[in-house]
Amino acid sequence: MSNIGKLFILIGIMWLFQLWFAYKQAKIFQDDIRSLRKQGTMAIGVGGRRYRGGRAFVALTAGEDGIVKDGMVLKGFTIFARSQRLTAYTGFSIDEIASGDRIALGEKRKVQEAAKSSAQHIVEHRDRIKAGGE
């Protein structure tokens, strides 16, 4: 087998490992946010760019009163990033976060974008329920 063939096999093996690690990371994040689902309406938002500093995933939970009860954030550039509690939005109105009026000053822009996206999903869900749809 030529060196080029060995190189392609090595690249294929590395790609399979990357897929497996990404799957494991997603599974761990899903396990981490399972507790948020029990607290109310939960949504996940995405912020940041894929190849410029990585993406952030924010899961927010809002009660029926529209106040954020809890949150989790997954941010980082590698597949080894782990989720952490996000308390910067706890106690604030989901409508303020969705409109962009309320941002967490201590967080990076990608986390702020992801929180806004998550809040917008919750507001859209709430509006569909009020309109009689599911």
Image (spheres, helix red, strand yellow):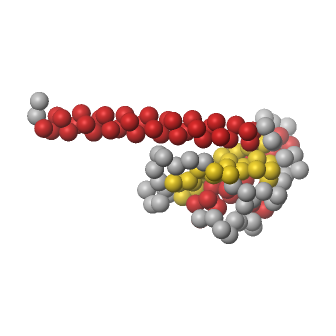
Q: Within the image, what quadrant is residue 8 found in?
A: top left
Asked whether, in this view, residue 81 is left or right of residue 133, the answer is left
The percent coordinates of residue 59 (x first, y second) are 68, 48
> On the image, which quarter does residue 38 sit in?
top right
Name above or below for residue 1 compared with residue 18: above
Residue at 80% across, 41% down: 39
**Residue under the image location 60 percent in, 48 percent down:** 83
In this rendering, position of residue 129 left or right of residue 60 = right
For the point 68% across and 52% down, which residue is it?
85
Q: Tell me what residue is drawn at x 75 percent, y 66 percent.
A: 102
Which residue in the rendered view is the most extreme toward the top? 1
Measured along the vertical axis of the image, is residue 48 above or below residue 1? below
Q: Please state, as top left, top right, bottom left or bottom right, where the N terminus lies in the image.
A: top left
Residue 81: give x, y in percent of width and height.
52, 49
Outermost residue, left direction? 2
Q: Is residue 49 visible?
A: yes
Q: Is residue 53 left or right of residue 83?
A: left
Residue 125 position within the rendered picture, expressed as x and y whole percent measured from the top left: 76, 44
Among all residues in the image, which is located at the extreme right?
A: 65
| Residue 98 visible within the image | no
Number of numbered discs visible in the structure rendering = 0
Q: Quadrant of the C terminus?
A: top right
Most distant residue in the bottom direction: 105
24 or 43: nearer the viewer: 24
Q: Residue 122 at what x, y percent from top left?
A: 75, 48
